[in-house]
Image (spheres, rainbow, N blue to C red):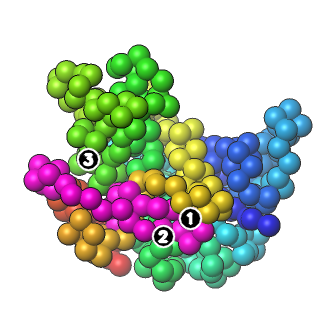
Amino acid sequence: MAKLSIIGAGAVGTAAAHWAAVKGVAEEIVLVDVVPDLAKGKALDIAQSAPVHGFSCRLKGTEFWEDIADSDVVILTAGRPRKPGMTRDDLLKVNLEIVRSCAEKVRELAPSACLIVVTNPIDAMVYAAYRITGFPKNRVIGMAGVLDSARYRYFIAEALGVSPKDVQALVMGIHGDHMLPLVRLANVSGIPIRELLPEEKIAEIVERTRKGGGEIVSYLKTGSAFTTPGLAAVEMAEAILRDEKRVLTCSVWLEGEFDISGVFLGVPVVLGRNGVERILTFTLTEEEKKALSASVEAVKNQIALTGL
Ligand SMILES: NC(=O)c1ccc[n+]([C@@H]2O[C@H](COP(=O)([O-])OP(=O)(O)OC[C@H]3O[C@@H](n4cnc5c(N)ncnc54)[C@H](O)[C@@H]3O)[C@@H](O)[C@H]2O)c1
Ligand SMILES: O=C(O)C[C@H](O)C(=O)O
């Protein structure tokens, strides 16, 4: 019986629990938060949609860490979101301590789990979780590429007036201003977007994708995006729990792939039962390599600030 635990019953954690229940990715879903009764209330609310929607998993909200014991997958969303005027890097110090305490619990109670980290700044927080849990690199995975690629795909579809389902595109690199939405490989049912859109429009979409999180923060004022981030994390969890071998862009530990080492960075990987089963490398152009190296520098600076 598959068990999924979600740490943090805030906006992203609640969305993830909801999507996970609706998609039926695990028989048992646990939502945990340090605030007494918060997760209990959120889980009960989601559970009460079961008769209407028609799902039947067991859903539990709790403040007791023991409830995450023996999870197959843990999604870590605990931590502060940014507000207008802040960068994700501004969250590093406060969220590092939260990630530290949660990762210690995961190490103790769910030592065989695959850990999906969502907390920002993601590429540094997933590094911290990797160091603190001591889990092998295939079982500590950052969520950002699925979200950034979804935004990129959506903006392309919107510009062309076509179904987002038919747009394939990926965003590599850091989850930040230096991310790399790949234009060369973006396509609509196999047709390169450069054949369909003028360069100025493509440049506008790339820039909007890079700033996609900030755009939503500027509208929400009190926090950041949560619906698609929750779904993106669940898509990764589902790929692992169902051993789907999905190809998704995730922030993973690199040891020479794309000539990059010693950082977590968004690259396409195969996700299955063992977590990251393979990193899919391919030849980048000189321009793409340059853009990716800006991501590497930015993540290295973040990692240095963790002191780990
Ligand atoms: N990687 C991404 O693409 C991405 C996308 C969206 C949000 N995020 C990040 O996800 C994080 C959560 O965002 P949110 O909007 O859900 O925030 P939120 O404030 O709504 O929820 C965070 C929750 O974490 C809980 N929490 C704090 N410390 C905890 C601990 N030690 N143990 C358990 N729970 C704890 C809080 O009580 C709160 O309920 C933020 O850091 C945000 O920046 C990342
Ligand atoms: O932008 C944020 O701070 C939240 C998240 O990283 C996002 O991209 O929506």
Determine if the magenta segment contains residue 271. yes
Using the image as rendered, state which of residue 291 and residue 39 is in the foreground: 291
Kind of residue at badge 2: Glu
Residue at the extreme front of the image, as rendered: 190
Q: Residue at horizontal 40%, vertical 42%? A: 149
Q: Which residue is mark 3?
A: 180
- Marks 2/1 in contact by CB < 8 Å: the verdict is yes
Kind of residue at badge 1: Gly
Element on which disc 3 rests: strand
- Marks 3/2 in contact by CB < 8 Å: the verdict is no
Q: Residue at horizontal 36%, vertical 34%? A: 190
Q: Which residue is mark 1?
A: 272
The label nearer to you, 3 versus 2, is 2
- Residue 152 lies, with reference to residue 243, above or below; the image says above
Q: State the CA–CA distance, disc 2 to disc 1.
A: 6 Å
- Residue 204 lies, with reference to residue 107, above or below; the image says above
Element on which disc 2 rests: strand
Q: Position of residue 170 (x, y in %)?
A: 35, 45
Q: Which mark is residue 277?
A: 2
Q: Which span is picked out in magenta?
A: 264-290
Q: Residue at horizontal 59%, vertical 80%? A: 107
Q: Position of residue 110 (x, y in %)?
A: 66, 76
